[in-house]
Every structure is written in structure tokens, then in C-alpha cells.
Image: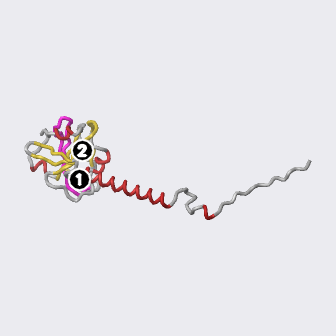
Amino acid sequence: MAKKKRTTRRRTFNEASVSSNSSTGFSKKTKLMAILIGLVLAIASAAGYYLATSAGGPNVVDIRIGDCVIKAEIADTPQLREIGLSGRKTLKAGHGMLFVFEFPNRANFWMKDTSIPLSIAFISTDGIILQIEQMTPFDLSLISSRYPVKYALEVNRDFFQENGITVGDAIDLTNVIERGN
């Protein structure tokens, strides 16, 4: 018996039917749509962050210490606490930032990328000021609380002294607690 010669078929493609994007499988229209969606999401994210952290936005509460009222931005997520007041050129009088921790701990702060001279009050769970420290712009050394704290309040340097606020004073955190912090 004679062996049949086996032939192999070659598959050929009409070059006109194959787009230049065939290696990725996405058309130009699909790629453009993905880029536009990415830009919209980035803009929406930036706008949300701005609204959440700008004065008067949803993350600002009034905090009372005696007769003094401070408009405090709330930094209650790891991302907001990490950013803090860094990158800002000024801090309005009577304004500050309240750092809220999930649970009491010994807190550490530094002044990386922060050009505003600040004072910081370390505050217990029940709203008592346990410690006040001065912070120097751009100083990378750590300012640490001596005791576990639930809150820390940064304000313009000497604000506490100028307003007669000292260690042992109570802060009314009602507005913060009502927010769920």
C-alpha cells in the first residue's frame, strides 16, 4: 500500500480584515473610552478630596475649648492623617486640624512638607488635653505623645498660649462624636 502524502494547510488572513490593534484586541474607540473614563474618575476623586478637606466642607466641625471655638478639619483616615497640613502655605486664625485615631495610642507627628509653625495638643478619649508641644516647619524629628491619645489638634503656633488653653483643659468634642468619631 502506498502511503498518502499528508499536506498541511496554511491559514491565511486577509490583511484588510486585521486591524493594527489586533495585538491588544482593543479598538481605538475602546481605548479612547477607557482613557476618558479614567480621567473622569481621577477628576471626581480629586474633587471629592477637595470638598472633604476644604474649610466649610463636610469634614469641618466646630470644637469648643472654654470660650474658644476652633474650626477643625477632621483627619480620620490613614490617608488624611498622613497628609495632615502638609503642603499648605497658611492656616487661618481660629482654624486647625483634628486627628482622630481608631483607638488610643501613642501618636507620633513630624513636620515633613509643612511650612506653617504649629502647636499640637494631644487629647485623651474623654477630651482632656494631656500635652501641648510646639512644632517647627519642615522639622523631621518626631513629636510624640507621652500617653495614649485618641485625638491630636494642630493649630497655629502659640494659639493655645494666646487663648489661655493649657494641659488639663477639656475640649468639647460633641460635634466630633456626633459624626461617629
Q: Is residue 128 left or right of residue 15?
A: left
Q: Residue furthest right?
A: 1
Q: Position of residue 172 (x, y in %)?
A: 14, 39
Quarter of the image where one finds residue 170: top left
Residue occupying the point 23% across, 46% down: 74
Q: Position of residue 167 (x, y in %)?
A: 14, 41
Q: Is residue 167 left or right of residue 79?
A: left
Number of marks in picture: 2
Q: Position of residue 101 (x, y in %)?
A: 27, 40
Q: Position of residue 27 (x, y in %)?
A: 52, 59
Residue occupying the point 12% across, 39% down: 169
Label 2 CA crowd tier, 10 Å (few <14, some 14–19, many 20+):
many
Label annotation for residue 54: 1
Q: Is residue 125 magenta?
A: yes
Q: CA distance from mark 1 to mark 2?
A: 15 Å
Quarter of the image where one finds residue 177: top left
Label annotation for residue 7: none
Residue occupying the point 18% across, 39% down: 130
SS category of the residue bearing label 1: loop
Quadrant of the frame with the C terminus = top left
Q: Residue furthest bottom?
A: 16
Q: Nearer the viewer, residue 49 or 128?
A: 49
Task: Specify the amino acid type for callout 1.
Answer: Ser
Query: N-terminal of the two: label 1 or label 2?
Result: 1
Q: Which residue is mark 2?
A: 99
Task: Specify the amino acid type for callout 2.
Answer: Phe
Q: Nearer the viewer, residue 20 or 167?
A: 20
Residue occupying the point 14% across, 54% down: 93
Q: Nearer the viewer, residue 107 or 80?
A: 80
Label 1 CA crowd tier, 10 Å (few <14, some 14–19, many 20+):
few
Task: Please provide the residue range marked out in magenta.
Answer: 114-133
Vertical arrangement, residue 14 with respect to residue 55, above or below: below
